[in-house]
Image (tube, rainbow, N blue to C red):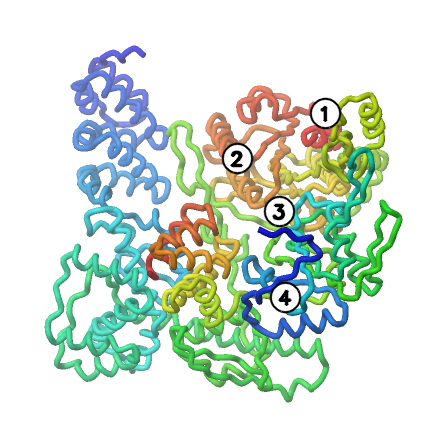
Amino acid sequence: MRTFRLDEYRIEDEPYYEATGDEITLFEAAYNNQLPILLKGPTGCGKTRFMEYMAWRLQRPLITVSCHDDLTASDLVGRYLIKGGETVWIDGPLTQAVKAGGICYLDEIVEARKDTMVVIHPLADDRRVLPIEKLGTLIEADPEFAIAISYNPGYQSVLKDLKQSTRQRFVALEFGYPKPELEITIVARESGLDRALATQLVKFAGMTRNLKGSGLEEGASTRLLVHAAKLMAAGVPPVSACQSAVAQALTDDPEMLASVNELSSSLF
Amino acid sequence: MNSPSLLSHSAIQQRLDELLEVEFSFRDTEAPARAIAQLPAQRQHYLISWIERIASTHVELGFQVACNSVAAEALMTTDVFEAWIFHAMDSYDVEGLRPALLVIEQYQQFASQQQARLQGALLQDHEGVLQRFLQGLSGRSLKLAASETIYTDTETLYLPPMQSLLSTPEQNFHLYKVTTALLWAQIQFGSFRALRTVEAPTAEFIQLFHALESLRLETCLQRELPGLHRVLQQIKTVADETELDATWLEFRQQLANPGFSAMDTVILAQRELDRLKPIPLNCYQGQINFEAVTACMNARIEKEKARFKVGLNTLLEELNKSNSEPPPSDKRFTKQQEANPSTSEGVQIEILLDDMPAPLPDNMQSLKRSILLDFGDIPDEYLQAAGPGDYDAKLLHDQTRDAEDVWQGSYHEEGAYLYDEWDFQRRHYRKNWCAVRERAVKPLHDDFVEKTLDKYHGLIKHLRKTFEALRHENRLLKRQPEGDDVDIDALVEALADAHLGFEMTDRLLTKMQRNERNIAVIFMVDMSGSTKGWINDAERESLLLLCEALESLGDRYAIYGFSGMTRKRCELFPIKHFEESYDTTIRARISGIEPQDYTRMGFAIRHLTQVLQKTDAKTRILITLSDGKPDDYDSYRGEYGIEDTRRALIEARRGGIHPYCITIDEEARDYLPHLYGPAAYSVISDVRSLPLKVSDIYRRLTT
């Protein structure tokens, strides 16, 4: 086991990522022009993997913060701690990235508290600075620093929407589920499952996506498919793999579960 | 419990006379009383209680049950007996007295069918699962409906209401599933598209085509849905279907070729028409109802063509808006076909605009899929964009009947939400009893809003202030082990402690705790006729004040008025939906609240419970503003109305909703505790103080 400082960790091996469009060129262009990036797309379609891949490609440290509804500005910027009677300032992940020229990736940004989002504003325009109120200082971002946030527009709740003042600072890249051919390749490659079964799984995913809006909030994501495929590759019968890895993950509604299970048992 | 005492013949007859209002009719209770008198005490009481329950619905039904009960009960188990009576009452609710009497009369048939019911599967029970199964398969929304014959008109699949051919409910469900899948396959794999190319097909031809095509579809299913095909094979074995003879086996061989399309089946059927006798249908197969298919498809094709062309036009307009060049007349839509084995048509069609893929919106994508299913292609003429003026508006938009029209004629249930209602005498729900509809409130732009805001000028200011104070109760928590800032007081103390040799605490930080309000509330406002006059004014004023106050609080809220006139006409008047923001339209709607008819409450509570449940708020509140007891034109008064309302409130509470009632009815203390519980209502004695009180009550309720 090895432990790294957040701002020193580099991804060494190339993460597996299949481009679905021109997102790699776009990201690189935005990065080279110091523009902040917003990744839009449903859960499990490969946003985080894409970030890992880009961090590897650009050879920058990637600092990921998964946002939750209790995440405060101090959690990002830093705070005072007390050590042996002395107060010590500890940089938060955002500050670390700003100093080290890393890529700071705020995953599911809408989950964070509203005041947290404002902290990134001065970093996300041409000022590229991070004011630290408690220290009374201002840090200029390293030229290599980049900020990226992700956001799932599928959440219909008004409360979980990005403010215009936030979203209008970003270059937006839209992610969807990959086309069937590509998704089959991804599933097969990630799980080691044979192509024939992977094809069936992707077909199954398409069926659940048909149900979006008529009882399901989301169809099965690529991530769920990979889970199911891994179970199947480990010898679990396809129908039970779909049940545990996909159906149960999608819904708790018994009628919906029954329907999804009927679909998978029809396919395999 | 004491065992009930045995009743004598005359005692029973007396009781029956009472229940069945013999005084006013020619009913003779002599015979039924004699029959019941023969039974042991427990069963006597059991039967009489049931006769009482059904007589509360209709006396004649009660009498008929009384006459048949002894014989019926002897034939049936308790469950079946009760099911029989409920079935009779449901038939009465839905179809009227005659069909209900028929159900009672044919108790023997009911008893014998019960066996089938035990092993069978009901469409009603599985409709939800099958419906979604189908949606998952096709992506095109196909409907399910009950019918004695199995067929599809390409938009609705007709399935039998009960399937009891096989010996267990599970197998019968599988039978439903296979039938559904085969009907879906007819649509999906182009059977009808091919059949429509034949000019005036004869019945014999359709039969033969169907028999051959079914074989082809089965092999399609085998390729596409191997799991389902296994189930199909099992059913064949269980149902003991006859094996195909050598000729047909050979045909099946041919039809199993993946390159074989429905058109090839047509050719095959034409060739063999005089030589080959069609084999009988399997138990899971439907029929082809060619007239229904033709009618349905023609209507759809016309509709979709219009919509597709108009849709392309809209697309063009939108593109022109975003960039002015090149001029629109130069732009042309073309299509590009690509072989794509993963789709069922084998082709993928991309719509191009000036050789660039056109960004079709979702509704156009599904139109494209649907057209592709009907034609296997996008016909060239579809690609010419057309303005909406070129077509009848009826084609472009689904017809929605005006709410006013619906009440006339026999359409009351069309498009309405149906809710059950509790019948306390029957101790059972009346199924789909209330037809509920949402109707728009006409906004009234008069001086009411201004006047009220002026009149309560001071109060509104006060309310805003008190409500604002509620908004974020942020508290700075001191001496926390984790937090954002150093708690200097705690640190000083801790350092002093350390100097004195005590252990130093780690609770040295401060943390801001935010209590975010996560409340959704619906105000359900009585719009019955009795509110006419100052009650209505007070209600409107209260709502206006409340909105002003709630705006500063930031809680999600909605306002609905309710009224009703018999079960067929239950109306909800949305004044403000959750997603609407408070503006002049909403104000004008509040101003436009007018007294309507009666106070039927159960349906409103049930409907709004569902609306509330769709929100993801932590706390969900349903506040009723009313002026009296539940009351409606039909039997919805007195105990019946109160008991149904109570039942609806129990359902709401079970769904995690907190109901509360604000009323101006002085007598409300007699019945409200029974409905809302002892602490969940307020009675306001002075109507004029309602506007002051409502906001105040709301504030207390949510802190």
User: Mark 4 belongs to which amino acid?
Assistant: Trp
Given the image, what chain letter belongs to the residue carrying mark 1? B
Foreground: A214 or A86? A86
Given the image, what chain letter belongs to the residue carrying mark 2? B
Q: Position of residue A85 (x, y in %)?
A: 81, 33
Determine whether the residue tagged by mark 2 lies in a helix, strand or loop: helix
Residue identified by numbered label 3: B574
For marks 1 and 3, give the one nearer the viewer: 3
Residue identified by numbered label 2: B652
For marks 2 and 3, give the one nearer the viewer: 2
Q: How far apart are the two marked residues, 1 and 4, measured between alpha carbons?
A: 73 Å
Q: How far apart are the two marked residues, 4 and 2, measured between alpha carbons?
A: 54 Å
Few, some or many C-alpha atoms within 10 Å of disc 1 (few <14, some 14-19, many ≥20)? Answer: few
Query: Are dots 4 and 2 in contact, CB under 8 Å?
Result: no
Q: Which mark is residue A56?
A: 4
Q: How far apart are the two marked residues, 4 and 3, measured between alpha carbons?
A: 54 Å
Q: Position of residue B113 (x, y in %)?
A: 20, 43
Few, some or many C-alpha atoms within 10 Å of disc 4 (few <14, some 14-19, many ≥20)? Answer: some
Foreground: A66 or A211? A66
Marks 4, 2 in one chain: no
Vertical placement of residue B681 versus B328, above or below: above
Determine whether the residue tagged by mark 4 lies in a helix, strand or loop: helix
For marks 2 and 1, give the one nearer the viewer: 2
Residue identified by numbered label 1: B686
For marks 1 and 4, give the one nearer the viewer: 4
Query: Are dots 2 and 3 in contact, CB under 8 Å?
Result: no
For marks 4 and 2, give the one nearer the viewer: 4
User: Mark 3 belongs to which amino acid?
Assistant: Pro
Vertical placement of residue A85 versus B35, above or below: below
